[in-house]
Image (cartoon, rainbow, N blue to C red):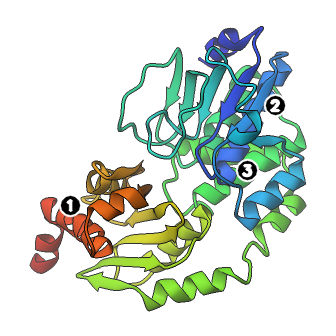
Amino acid sequence: MVQDLINLCKGREVYIQTHNFPDPDAIASAFGLQVLLKHFDISTVLCYEGRIDKLSTSRMVQQFGIEIFSYDDIRANMKEEDPIICVDSQKNGGNITDFIGDEIACIDHHPTFVKVEYRYSDIRITGACSSIIAQYFKELSVEPDENTATALLYGLKMDTSQFTRGVTPLDIEMYSFLFERSNTNVLSALEHNSMEFNDLKAYGAAIENIEVFGHFGYTVIPFSCPDALIATLADFILALDEVDVVVVGSKREDGIKLSVRSELSEVNAGALVYEAVKDIGNGGGHAFMAGGFVSNSALEKLGGYSESVLRDRFTKELEKVGYFRDLQSK
């Protein structure tokens, strides 16, 4: 019960950590939890590693006046005994930096690939982590203010791709709970004009470089893109009739960021990326959507054709689950 989390945090200043390069659902969940804990006189600091580098996310932070700090801003003040709540992420999950403090709790909606013991844990599969936080308000009979309800609803809609992906009964219930408390004008404004001109270059590069093997699409963008844009490009390619599994990569100064999508029950996107990069990087996520990262140093160890080797690691994992064999039988 969420009351256990409140009891665990009382009398302490708590850090609420999102996954690296947080998206709207991660920030909405952290913000919602901060508002909820404040109701019980618990002080919190929202934090993350990486950047808030997508227009939709930065506009959301500005719209709701959310104060969230990068690890560089708080590192000097954080101590080993400081409590951390992981939100929309799990320690050792592949997309979250291990901060100095003590991860006492985890609230997440992704599958677990590396089991960790927390003093409080609420890990369950839902379309969005925002739904779990919204349920806390309802369970505790705490009325969310308009800003909080709108932020959580925005996170919910974004992570379920407007209720077309991974939706569970809880998401539907929480949509109703949040909608009547939200500002639909603000929500509409956030949902429109969320693409920047430079995003078009990424679309062009993804299309130009795409390779299709059977119904497996693979493409690498030769420059750095925000995490949210890479995910959007993966959804875009998955919409092709000829593709039912896709991997999109984006080259960065320190390595390559990956986004994976699957429409097939027999191909688990989270397991696919986890297995493909487990000894050279990190990755994981849902059965239908996942992400990963491989550093430059790891890519160098793959040899002079590292990008081809990386692609082949995905095709080999698909072969293991009979993906290409199943295609031939259809």
Q: Which of marks 3 and 2 is in front?
A: 2
Q: Which residue type does callout 3 highlight?
A: Leu
Q: Which residue type does callout 1 highlight?
A: Glu
Residue 256 x, y percent position in the rendering = 45, 64
Q: Which of marks 1 and 2 is in front?
A: 1
Pick whichever, 35 or 284, lies toward us.
284
Q: Name the residue under label 1.
A: 317
Q: Mark 2 points at which residue?
A: 35
Query: In this image, 103 relative to 292: left or right?
Result: right
Structural crowding at the residue carrying mark 1, measured as other residues with C-alpha within 10 Å and reported as few (<14), some (14–19) or many (≥20): some
Determine the CA span between mark 1 and mark 2: 43 Å
- Seen at 47% across and 42% down, the residue is 110
Determine the CA span between mark 3 and mark 2: 15 Å
Q: Which residue type does callout 2 highlight?
A: Val
Q: Quadrant of the C terminus?
A: bottom left
Pick whichever, 1 or 108, lies toward us.
108
Decide: is 94 above or below 258. Answer: above
* Residue 71 visible to the viewer: yes
Dot 2 falls on a residue whose secondary structure is helix
Q: Name the residue under label 3.
A: 153
- Seen at 49% across and 19% down, the residue is 118
* Residue 288 visible to the viewer: no
